[in-house]
Amino acid sequence: MAKEITPRSEDYSQWYNDIVRKSGLADHSAVRGCMVIKPHGFAIWESMQRQLDQMFKDTGHVNAYFPLFIPKSFLSREAQHVEGFAKECAVVTHHRLMNAPDGSGVVVDPDSRLEEELIVRPTSETIIWNTYKDWIQSYRDLPLLINQWANVVRWEMRTRLFLRTAEFLWQEGHTAHATREEAIEETRMILDLYATFAEEWMAMPVIKGVKTPNERFAGAEDTYTIEALMQDGKALQSGTSHFLGQNFARAFDVTFLNKENQQEHVWATSWGVSTRLMGGLVMTHSDDDGLVIPPRLAPWQVVIVPIPKPAPEINDAAQKLIRELRDRQIRVHYDNDETKRPGFKFAEHELRGTPVRIAIGLRDLEQGQVEIARRDTREKTMVPADGAAGYIQKLLEDIQARLLESARKYRDDMTFHADTWEEFERILDDKGGFVYAHWDGTTETELAIKEKTKATIRCIPLDNPPEQGKCILTGRPSSQRVLFARAY
RNA sequence: CGGGGUGUAGCGCAGUCCGGUAGCGCGCUACGUUCGGGACGUAGAGGCCGGAGGUUCGAAUCCUCUCACCCCGACCA
């Protein structure tokens, strides 16, 4: 069975680390809190990027690139914003090294101190809005719909591969609009886009909702979120979309002339998903034998293993099948490495999460069939070689659908309603998961609940039915349930 | 940033208490036999013991300082 992977039942955190490292997604680097994304992990991220980028472009956005460095003064222009990020910024203070006088290596040249220190971007609102000021004059310049793919740095105290690293990759969309309504519409549209991506591509079901003021992005009027539930019953904030109101427009003096020839501040949004999604992908589908990747994101959707090793007849059959699969836009790899045995390859591809494995042996060829094994359920089927490509195409779609279905079933089974404090605590302690409960709407109560249970309000779900009730903690009246969970 | 733990060959570890110049398993290389679920045999290669100081005739081992990682908290995408 799987070598060296700690079972989830024994130690979930260790299982996660084992999966990420042993399936070749990423490694720790020599730099504190920073990871090396390895080719297999980066290939999955590229699949995500490719699809998201297409979805952004299909909704009218274009890509651009803004600087890594932000003048320190920019960050302090928006009070809430600087407060939110000040504690975790990397700061560039000098621009030159020199040989140490005692020959011990290089040291920072004290004469090279910067006049204005630079912040390594934790997010780009400030530099972008400083730029937008010059780009926007008229309502005819709006809306401005720009995305950038970039790295950002947040100096985290405690890091975990993909879930929280000091440097991470993401996309950040920054849009400017003429009206409040249009900006809110953009914010909600992107949230839907993220949810669609999460469900249809990652096979990761999410709850769409709005954050409480306490959990809101620093500088936003409203933060929308998609929340997913991991296999250990903890929630993962997987993407956020912010309605920024006119906060940044005011801070950076971004105005436009409307049709009535009046100056107005523009309305803003920003939104992002990051390499954290990789962590969500792992913790939604993978098992004790290794990674499980939904077919739509898998670098290789199909691997063909010759049994027992490559031979002319097998190679011919494999090449024919490969052509048929590629004609159907299926990503297929022929593992014709003669130095490894079939059993080893089986285990290796299972560890790395390839959705479908085809085994072609001499005995199979005589009978005109191939063995097809699916990673998600571990089922094996003998299929006639002639119709194999069509079978596999359907199988990939089936795997994609089944992964979403089983993740949704798990999520639903782990979603509870609590009406009393005792019940609330018991669910969190015994099972974890999502808990719908009434809340009196105050930050004070929210913090008190967090203090007592470690659970936070993940969101106020968008499709929430109104329901009169009493706050789980204070007993004060409440008009709807909110979604609680312990979270990553 | 607090508390706990770990750094010795690519990976996982023993050796550290009691100082004497490093070992085991896996992996790696070559050859042979194998090959339908992580093969076996034989012969090899590979380590200034995380780093820097110090004590000592002599340090993986003792002392001081550092760095990194893991786990648990506080903070956060």
Image (cartoon, rainbow, N blue to C red):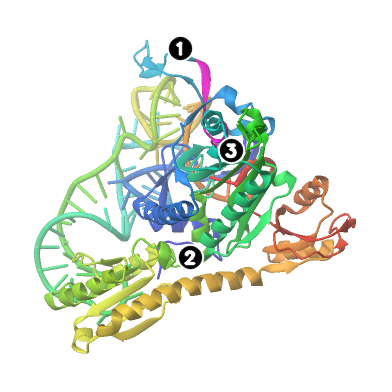
Q: In the image, what residue occupies the spot 45% across and 51% down? A: A57
Q: Residue A133 lies in what quarter of the image?
A: top right
Rendering coords of residue A103 (x, y %) = 34, 14
Q: In the image, what residue occupies the spot 36% across and 17% down? A: A104
Q: Nearer the viewer, mark 1 or mark 3?
A: 3
The image shows a total of numbered marks equal to: 3
* Label 3: chain letter: A
Q: Are marks 2 and 1 on the same chain?
A: yes
Question: Looking at this rendering, what residue extends furthest in the front direction?
Answer: A260
Secondary element type, mark 2: loop
Q: Earlier in the sequence, mark 1 or mark 3?
A: 1
Give the residue pinned by disc 3: A139
**Residue A159 shows in the view:** yes
Q: In the rendered view, would you say A133 is above or below A285? A: above
- In three-dimensional space, the C-alpha distance between marks 1 and 3, rounded to whole angstroms, equals 48 Å
- Residue A87 located left or right of residue A453: left
Q: Nearer the viewer, residue A45 or A23?
A: A45
The magenta region covers A115-126
**Label 3 crowding class (10 Å Cα cut-off): few <14, some 14-19, many 20+?**
some
Give the residue pinned by disc 1: A110
* Label 2: chain letter: A
Q: Is residue A267 magenta?
A: no
Q: In the image, what residue occupies the spot 42% across and 65% down? A: A296
- In three-dimensional space, the C-alpha distance between marks 2 and 3, rounded to whole angstroms, equals 49 Å
Q: Which residue type carries mark 1?
A: Pro
Q: In the image, what residue occupies the spot 45% across and 62% down? A: A5
- Residue A468 located left or right of residue A354: right
Q: Nearer the viewer, residue B60 or A264?
A: A264
Rendering coords of residue A130 (x, y %) = 55, 28
Secondary element type, mark 1: helix
Give the residue pinned by disc 2: A286
Question: Looking at this rendering, what residue extends furthest in the bottom direction?
Answer: A367
